[in-house]
Amino acid sequence: MKGIAVVMKLSEIAKILESDFLSGEEKKDQEFHYCRGSDLMSDVLAGFAEGSVFLTGLVTLQTVRTASVSGAGAIVFVRNKKPSPEVIALAKQEDIPLLVTPLSMFVSCGRLYQGGLTGVHGNR
Amino acid sequence: MTSIHKSYHVAKNDFIHAGEASIHVKNLLKSMNYNQDLVRRVAICGYEAEMNLVMHGGDGELSVDVNSERVILEVADRGPGILDIELAMQEGYSTAKEEYREMGFGAGMGLPNMKKNSDALKITSEPGQGTHVSMTFYNKG
């Protein structure tokens, strides 16, 4: 399956994940090729993240800062995890769209994989 | 390009503000039109160092010195120090508390990641006195 190059708009990702925008809806046309699902911020910082959509169950300020310094382009909180207003405010400041989905990490990753997104390490 | 020096205070256990200094540094370098790769490497190393300081160090400072040739990032704290630097550099080795792991950190990946993303890394530490980390990043254009 290597070599497949599916690009998904953030609006399409939101639809597939039945998710709502908490911030950054104006970036709904931004395109994504890569995706990562992780609750370990250290893994995100140690690997490729540029322009990826980042799925996590961790709703802290550090999740947003990890995305900001690593270059992740959007964050999706899984399992309906709702961040505090401070986390949403920081995401707005850092210009990173935030979405929340009722789906689990497993199902969210599965749906985006099925939709054609590639892992951050470049494989499928 | 003129040389710029900035210094930020980083407080122990302050997870509300941890990472702010590195994001300031990232924005500073971006505004100076450094290439994306260099900005990313400096931001990641700064953030890893800042988190280490907040989790393990005492209060301390993160400072950055920038000119057209290179960026030097220095992090100094007055914490307990690192007993065995060689051991601390091993991926997976960690003395982090459970509460830090629950925040997605403390996996023993910070120092190896700083080594990977910097062009030169120097750590000096004296048990009971604190730790000093210096990282250099060359501007390859």
Image (cartoon, coloured by chain):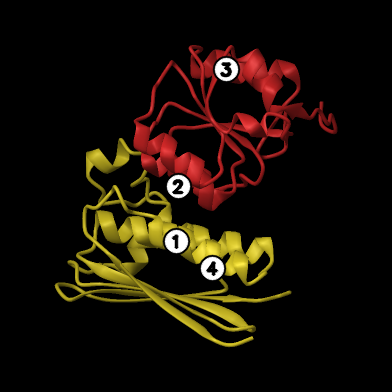
Chain colours: A red, B yellow
Residue B104 in sight? no
Marked residue chain, label 3: A
Residue at image location 59% in from the left, 48% down from the top: A71
Q: Would you name the residue on which mark 3 appears?
A: A108
Q: Would you name the residue on which mark 2 appears?
A: A65
Neighbour tally class for label 1: few under 14, some 14-19, many 20 plus, Cα within 10 Å: many
Neighbour tally class for label 3: few under 14, some 14-19, many 20 plus, Cα within 10 Å: many
- Percent across and percent down for residue A36 are 59, 33
Marked residue chain, label 2: A
Q: Would you name the residue on which mark 1 appears?
A: B22
Marked residue chain, label 1: B
Which residue type carries mark 1? Ser
Q: Secondary structure at mark 3?
A: helix
> Does residue A66 appear left or right of residue B132 in this picture?
right
In this view, the mark in front (1 or 3):
1
- Whichever of callouts 4 and 1 sits on the residue coming sooner in the sequence is 1
Q: Secondary structure at mark 1?
A: helix
Neighbour tally class for label 2: few under 14, some 14-19, many 20 plus, Cα within 10 Å: many
Which residue type carries mark 3? Ser
In the displayed image of the protein, which residue is found farthest to the left?
B128
The numbered dot on residue B28 is 4
Query: Where the N terminus of chain A falls, by quadrant?
Result: top right
Between the C-alphas of marks 4 and 2, the distance is: 16 Å
Which residue type carries mark 2? Arg
Residue at image location 50% in from the left, 19% down from the top: A105
